[in-house]
Each structure stands twice: as structure tokens, then as C-alpha cells.
Amino acid sequence: MSTNAPKVLGYDEQSRIERARERAKTVDGLMGLRGQRILEVGCGHGDFCKVLAEEYDCEVVGTEVLPYEDWKEIRSPQLTLLQMDIAKEQHFPENHFDRIVSFVVWEHMRHPWSALKECQRILAPTGKKYLHAYLYGAPRLSHLHYLVPDPWLHLTHSPREIMQRIDKNELPWYFWCNRVSYLHYLQYFRKLGFYVAYENIIREPFPEKHYQENEQLLGLYSEYDLRMHGFQVVLVFDERFPKEALDDAVYSKLVRGDRQR
Ligand SMILES: C[S@@+](CC[C@H](N)C(=O)[O-])C[C@H]1O[C@@H](n2cnc3c(N)ncnc32)[C@H](O)[C@@H]1O
């Protein structure tokens, strides 16, 4: 039987490398990766870094806050994997990287603004940043839908209630996601002088019935945010004034003159 459905990749090594190759192809098409000096923030097992170092002739650094066992197996002269938190340490020189990338990491960050600020510092003025992140409005952001299929579980139940529901004494690290909305991100980008050069907003059908049944709790959140699951963006600086905060068109010129950016 033939099917046109997209292939669903698993988490075994082979599938992970396949996913890394697909990601590399997509991001290369969006902002050019070949031969560049690249930082991947939140590199996980290191598959994407490995593909870039071995197949795209890149000099690559991957950072992670968690230790990953498989790093021991990865050896490439063009690749460095570091356990550190860019939100807390200024490890790299200013303007050091041509490209900074990350996949599904920013939603797990404790200090997303500080991490973005550090990326702005270490990215070259002509550099580009690819950011793919999920948002708190995503119905499956709890990452526990394989145990409890309710949409927005993370917004309708406390961590204690969820632990009781799944009969566990703790929640996995990937449950913890911040509440940064897309509008927060846009404001952060503006303050850091990042223009959005490419944008893809990830949306899925709205679970209307579940929303109506739980409106007392879900109505506490902006419906605009609940309809926005995630995004993929490419960020660039202004050619003439890189890293300078961008004007906010929402303020009139009069107010803008008095405001600190
Ligand atoms: C969902 S995993 C994604 C890993 C990898 N990017 C991938 O797509 O397979 C999120 C990762 O972000 C990492 N992370 C969270 N905060 C971080 C930070 N401040 N710096 C670097 N990595 C971070 C976590 O340790 C975790 O490995």
C-alpha cells in the first residue's frame, strides 16, 4: 500500500540522524550553513552538530545543560560539545559565531531572555539565528499526552495533580516549560535588534469542545496565545546598525523620543 503521509521518525539513533539531516537541509535552505562557524544551543544527543561537522564542513559547538551519555561516542575535529548554560555564562567571545541554531529548546529554558541576549552578544553582526520553539499555548506542551491525552493539561492542572493522575512522585524534566508567549519573543527580538527575516507560525486545529468545557481555567490565558503552538524564525541584524534596538511602531514619535529602548 502506498501512502503520502509524512514519515514519523522515532528516537533510535538512525531516526535521530535522519531527523538531523532533514533539519540541516531545511535550515541550510533558509540561511546557509555550509562552511560556517555554528553554535547549537541545547544540542541534546549532538546529532545535528555531528551532521554539520561531518557533512557541511562547519566548525560546530553544541551546548547543553544536561549531560548526554552518547557524547563520548562522537568524535570530530570540527566539533566541540560543552555542558554549560549560555543564559548564565559568557563563555564565548563577542561576535564569534556566523550562525546560531536551536530546536525545541527555548520553551524549556529557565532564563529565555538572558539566553537570547547572550546569543545577540556572540553572534557576528552579519550572523543569522534560527530559532524553533514551542509556546505555552500548545495543547500538548505538557509532553505527557502519551499518558494523559487532555489538551492543555499543563494549564488546567497543577504539577501535584498531574503527578497524582499519572501515579508518579516526580515529573520528567521535559514537562517544565516556561510561559513566554510569541508576543514576548517579538518584544525581546526588537530590544536586541533582531529583525525576523523568515517566520513560520505553527498552528493546529483548536480543541474547541475541550476549551468550552474548561473555560473557567483556560479563559485565564489569552486565546490568541492558546491558538499559537510554536514558531520557526530566522533572525538577522540591521546592516547599518547591527544589535541596536529597533523602533517600536506602537509608540508615537512623541513618546518614543522620551523612552529608553
Ligand atoms: C526537547 S530537548 C531538544 C534537544 C535537541 N535540540 C533535539 O531537538 O533533539 C530540549 C533540550 O534543551 C536543553 N536545555 C534547556 N535549557 C537549556 C539551556 N539554558 N542551554 C542549553 N540547553 C538547554 C535541555 O537540556 C534539553 O536537552
Image (spheres, rainbow, N blue to C red):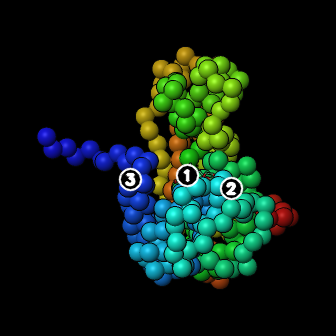
Q: Which residue is mark 1?
A: 104
Figure check: 232 above or below 194:
above
Q: Which residue is mark 3?
A: 15
**Contact? badges 1 and 3 (CB < 8 Å):** no
Label 1, label 2: how many angstroms apart (C-alpha)? 14 Å
In this orientation, does residue 239 appear?
A: yes
Residue in view at x 73 percent, y 79 percent: 93
Cβ of mark 2 under 8 A from ligand 1: yes
The amino acid type of the residue labelled 3 equals Ser
Q: Nearer the viewer, mark 1 or mark 3?
A: 3
Residue in view at x 73 percent, y 67 percent: 118
Q: Which mark is residue 229?
A: none
In the structure shown, which secondary structural element does the residue marked by tag 1 occupy?
A: loop
The amino acid type of the residue labelled 2 equals Val
Q: Which residue is mark 2?
A: 65
The quadrant in which residue 83 appears is bottom right
Label 3, label 2: how many angstroms apart (C-alpha)? 23 Å
Cβ of mark 1 under 8 A from ligand 1: yes
Q: Position of residue 139 (x, y in %)?
A: 53, 33
Q: Could you say which is closer to the camera, residue 170 or residue 151?
A: 170
